Each structure stands twice: as structure tokens, then as C-alpha cells.
Amino acid sequence: MKVVIAGIAALACLFLSTTEGSGRLFENNCGTIKDSSMGPKIENGRNANELSNPWMVAVFVGNVSMCGGTLISSRFVLTASHCIDMNYMKVRLGEYNKKNLECECVGSICTPRAIDIDVDKKIMHRDYEGNINDIGLLRMKNEVTFTDKIRPICLLDKYPEEPIAHLKITGWGENGIGETQPILQEATVEIYERKWCKRKLSMDPLDVSRICAGDTGEFSSDSCKGDSGGPLFAYVNEIGRTVQLGIISKGINSCSGLGSYTNVTHFMDWILGAVEYYKV
Ligand SMILES: *[C@@H]1O[C@H](CO)[C@@H](O)[C@H](O)[C@H]1NC(C)=O
Ligand SMILES: *[C@@H]1O[C@H](CO)[C@@H](O)[C@H](O)[C@H]1NC(C)=O
């Protein structure tokens, strides 16, 4: 699929300024949560807090949840290019525990646990190949209304300058022993020099378009099968919001140690161009 990149002047208006010097946001209403109990914690894979990841999306091919993704606006979901399939696709928003009942009732008022929306446009990177340019967008058939359970994550046009020690990854993918997780899992990872990923994942070239991250400690955390397309993100103090920095792209088969993530900042122009071109 071809995406025409619109002029820089037009793209500039898509961004909203944040504080001086820290870059501009793609969607103003982003990166905040209702649950204030989210603090930086360092553990291995663990259950995420229920309302801490309202941007988290389950990406379906047919009836099967294949990948993760993130809500970046009321109409678009960001995922990996390798998650995009020719068959029918839909996204599930507001999901947390896949084993919960379809509807949650308080007294006589019942609300659906999560909502499914059909994908009406699938946008792959034109030069996606293997693990290169592994970024894609899904346009939803209709806009969503933001709630405590459904909110977009921030995208910033500049890689944060403040040191970010710990980043998080989230997903419903398999744990180390091949079981998919009903409850959304989160893990903390660190950024590694690219040369480590190059060696361990034997990927070449591994350039600035990809981020090498993982946890090589004793109890290592990593992304696994089914987590692809989900976010690598951090709370950025400068702007007081949660910002997506990477997309889960490729790990080593054992799901422990290092993984390669698509560098979202590097692809900001591509994201803006695609959203502008396919907006309705
Ligand atoms: C989807 O699920 C329904 C109901 O469980 C089933 O009847 C249908 O065959 C499934 N479709 C696909 C494409 O797997
Ligand atoms: C991601 O890409 C941006 C823009 O090219 C770059 O400034 C930044 O250093 C990259 N991040 C990493 C961790 O490589």
C-alpha cells in the first residue's frame, strides 16, 4: 500500500506543543490514566493494574487475537507491520482480563467489558521487510469515545532528553512456557546498546530505526509470541504523561533476554503522513 507523505507545513499542524524543548504531542488527550497507583516498579512479568493501560489494544485476525497494538487517536491503532493480515481484522479496546464476563453489571446497568471495532484500512510500511520498517496502522471503522478504559497513548515528535532508566512493555502474549495470558501482563526493561541485539538476534542492519531493549538479569523479562505490535513505553516526567517509544517487533525465541523494537520516534513522519492521507 502506498502512503503519500504530505508537506511539512500540513504535518506541523497535526502536532500540539508541549512545554518548551520537550517536543510536540500527536494527540493532546493522551497518556493519562485514571488509576493513580501506577508508579515505577521493577519486577518481572506481572499483572498490570486494571486501568493503567487504557491505550492497549488486542489486534484480531478473524476470531483470533494475534497481536497487541495501541490506540493513538480516536480512529487509529498503531501496531507492527508483521501483524497486518489480508484476512478480516478487528481491534478490541478496553480489554484487561480476557476471562472476565462479556458484560459488567452494577445493579441493573450493564456495560460491555470491551468493545470490538472492525478495521477498515490496513496501512503497512511500503518498505517493510522482515524486521525492517516493522510498523503499521489500522484505521477503525468508527471513532471511539475516550473513557477511563479507552484512552490514547502519547506519541512525541522528539525522543525524550531526560534519562529514562526503565521502560515498560505490555501484552497478552505467551509467557516463557507457551501459555497465553488472560490478564494483561507488564514487564520492565532497559535499553541496551544496539550491538547486543545485533549479536544475540543476529540482525543486520540494526540501526537507529530500531531499539534494543530487554532484561538480561537473573529473572529476565521480555516480550514473547503474541505480544508483537504492543508498546514499549515510559512515563516522561518533562511532560507528565506516558509516551510510546517502541513497538514490540522481534525477540529471541526463548522469550528471555533481548528484543528488537521499532523506534516510534524515528517513524513519526511516516505515522503523520499515513494518518493525514487516510483520515476521513
Ligand atoms: C469465529 O467464531 C465463530 C463463533 O465461535 C465461528 O462460528 C466462526 O467459524 C469463526 N470464524 C472464523 C473465521 O474462525
Ligand atoms: C529513535 O529515533 C530517534 C529519531 O531518529 C533518535 O533520536 C533516538 O535516538 C532513537 N532512539 C534510540 C533509543 O535509538
Image (cartoon, helix red, strand yellow):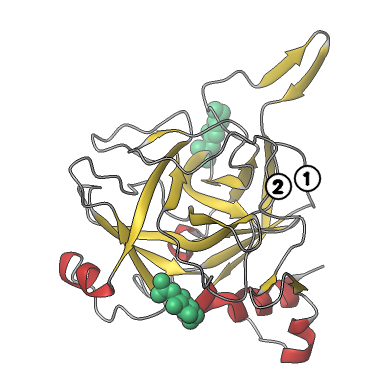
Lateral position of residue 263 relative to residue 136, left or right: left
Where is 7 relative to 261, above or below? below
Mark 1: secondary structure: loop
Image quadrant for the N terminus? Answer: bottom right
Ligand 2 is found in the corner quadrant, namely bottom left
Residue at image x 77%, y 75%? 14
Crowd tier of the residue under label 1, counting other residues whose Cα lies within 10 Å: few below 14, some 14–19, many 20 or above: some
Q: Which residue is mark 2?
A: 151
Residue at image x 35%, y 70%? 131
Image coords of residue 68 (percent x, y): 50, 49
Where is 5 relative to 26, above or below? below
Image coords of residue 184 (percent x, y): 48, 35
Mark 2 vs 1: CB contact within 8 A: yes
Crowd tier of the residue under label 2, counting other residues whose Cα lies within 10 Å: few below 14, some 14–19, many 20 or above: many
Q: Is mark 2 within 8 Å of ligand 2?
A: no
Residue at the farthest top position = 107
Which amino acid lies under the numbered mark 2 shown in the image of this protein? Arg
Rounded to the nearest angstrom, the CA distance separating label 2 from label 1 is 5 Å
17 or 8, which is in the foreground?
Answer: 17
Image coords of residue 167 (percent x, y): 43, 54
**Looking at the image, can residue 126 be seen?**
no
Q: Which residue is mark 1?
A: 146
Q: Closer to the N terminus: mark 2 or mark 1? A: 1
